[in-house]
Image (tube, rainbow, N blue to C red):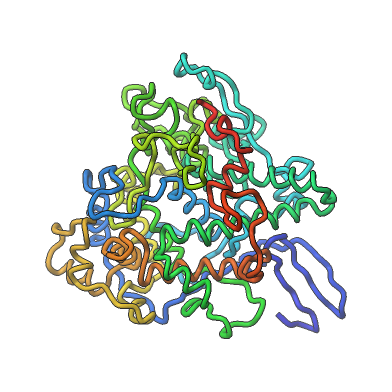
Amino acid sequence: MHRHHRETYYVVDEGRILEFEKGRSVARVPTAAEQQLAFRFSRLSKDKGVQLDEGLRARLAEAMTAVGQGGDDPDSGPPGTPVPAGFTYLGQFVDHDLTLDRTRVGLGEPVPVEELLQGRSPALDLDSLYGMGPDHAGSARFYEPDGHLKTGTSLGSDFPSDVPPVKIDQEGFDLPRAGETAGGTRADRRAPLIPDPRNDENLAVGQLHLAFIRFHNRVVDRLAERGVPESRLFRAARDTVVKHYQWMLRTDFLPRIVDPEIVESVFTRGRRHFEVPGRSRPGDLPTMPIEFSVAAYRFGHSMVRTTYQWNRVFRTGGRGGPATLGLLFRFSGTAGNLTPGNPDDPNDLSDLDDPNAGANLRLPSNWIADFRRLFDFGEAGRDDLVVPEAEFNRAKRIDTLLVDPLAALPTGTFDGRGRPAPPPVQRNLAFRNLTRAAMVELATGPQLAAQMRVAPLTEDQILRGAGGAVLDGLTAEERRLLVAHTPLWFYVLREAEVNERHPGRLTGVGGRLVAEVFHRAMEGSRTSIVKHPGWRPSLPSHRRGAFTMTDLLLFAFENDADLLNPLG
């Protein structure tokens, strides 16, 4: 902005306001109001959409989470792409890097897009990992004095007694936590010391965040060994981490969830719909379109499984049995309490709503992840790190079905712990997604298909799909309304479900939205592989010029099977 010959810029990665006046620059920490102005939500669609009423949203959500429909078979329904289950939670980690709605309104209350408060930079710059850096007063608590990110120590457990590694505290295998000195409730004392506490909403995303902490720390060590001066070490490490992260997303993550042809088109020929080059000023910060944050990027909710082969202890045939989704919520700090619950009903999550429930303040050692079960290291040529197929987790395909535990979320997943219990329907993730769209009058799927000139879904595809949600319980009038005003989230999931060329991958409206927002988010980052197209990965990888999620994990865990799987 221009005022009295002064220009003010927000530097996303450093949490600094730079003011230039008569050739002189002065850096200062931005106020909260300036941050909110710098990071904005936007509306990509030309028009608002007609919304389904609350009753119909509830019935549609019930159909999407009906008991027994989703099952736990990743190949239920028509064949889909067998994506390793770790990518489900990598997608959640990325979501928390891109968007955070800090708006304080009740579920269902209308809110103009202009009043939404974006608390995360809409760039793929890992601010959810780094905060504002070690020199910023608000983020210094995430760091060690030498610039390494802090890690935590897991808590030795007495179950099972015949697995020795579970009995000891394991340094570096839990997130750093506030601890006893934090005071407040027990939930306050087990809170993760990371920039975005949502990355401890479930154990899978929490352990992935820990892997990224280890990744950063290994890069710091590598650069220090190569003589990078201490004054430049953090900045150099962050640049290296962010570029390899973006490369992994571009070449490994996106093609697994979006039609590869769409990804290639967007990254080689550019964006056609979102903040198209030439229509905005050079240097403008990217915005966060609500069509992405409220709808298209919520595809990962359909990839979640009911149970997981988690590690040596919690698996089919293990002493603890397979890890249920409820237990992954329980053994987290933001949604859970890190403490075993009712032994007669381990899936009872009712105590998680109490911020003072649970004795543990650290993750028990028997719940440390075995990453070999979440990502396929055979893709990186490490057959020694491949587990039997029956013990490997694959994501459910992207479709209109969610596993039924997502119909009863712990209140900690939506910042409701310690407050009056919400109506049961408000615990249903599908209902929450549909209602958030209604709150901002989001454009419908058919509207965006017409605007983007994408072949629309037919009435039969919307109502019947291909092995997804069964809508026979809706009345004829409700089905008519659903076809005419299909909520964008449901529409995007149906597109993937009926995708014949790449079953279970985003296509059409959803594929374009996700690929273009990723491209813009990389372009808008200070450290950017889009702005530097000649850049190539420099860290060790299974193939020259490649850098995949398994390469990232191998580097983060020092190529050591005992670190990728400390329970044996």
Residue 122 or 372: which is nearer the viewer?
372
Q: For this view, does 345 lie left or right of residue 288?
A: left
Q: Residue at x 45, y 45 (%)?
A: 86
**Residue 45 sits above or below residue 416 on the image:** below
In the picture, which quadrant includes the N terminus? bottom right
Residue 95 or 558: which is nearer the viewer?
558
Percent x, y of residue 399: 30, 57
Q: Residue furthest top?
A: 161
Q: For this view, does 376 lie left or right of residue 493?
A: right
Residue 551 or 314: which is nearer the viewer?
551
Residue 132 or 85: which is nearer the viewer?
85
Q: Is residue 37 visible?
A: no
The quarter holding residue 209 reads top right
The quarter holding residue 521 reads bottom right
Percent x, y of residue 100: 53, 58
Q: Residue at x 47, y 60 (%)?
A: 254
Q: Residue at x 33, y 72 (%)?
A: 444
Percent x, y of residue 281: 63, 82
Q: Is residue 374 visible?
A: yes
Q: For this view, does 532 lie left or right of residue 317?
A: right
Q: How many marks are shown on the rendered structure?
A: 0
Q: Residue at x 26, y 64 (%)?
A: 498
Percent x, y of residue 397: 33, 53
**Residue 142 sits above or below residue 21 on the image:** above
**Residue 554 sits above or below residue 443 on the image:** above
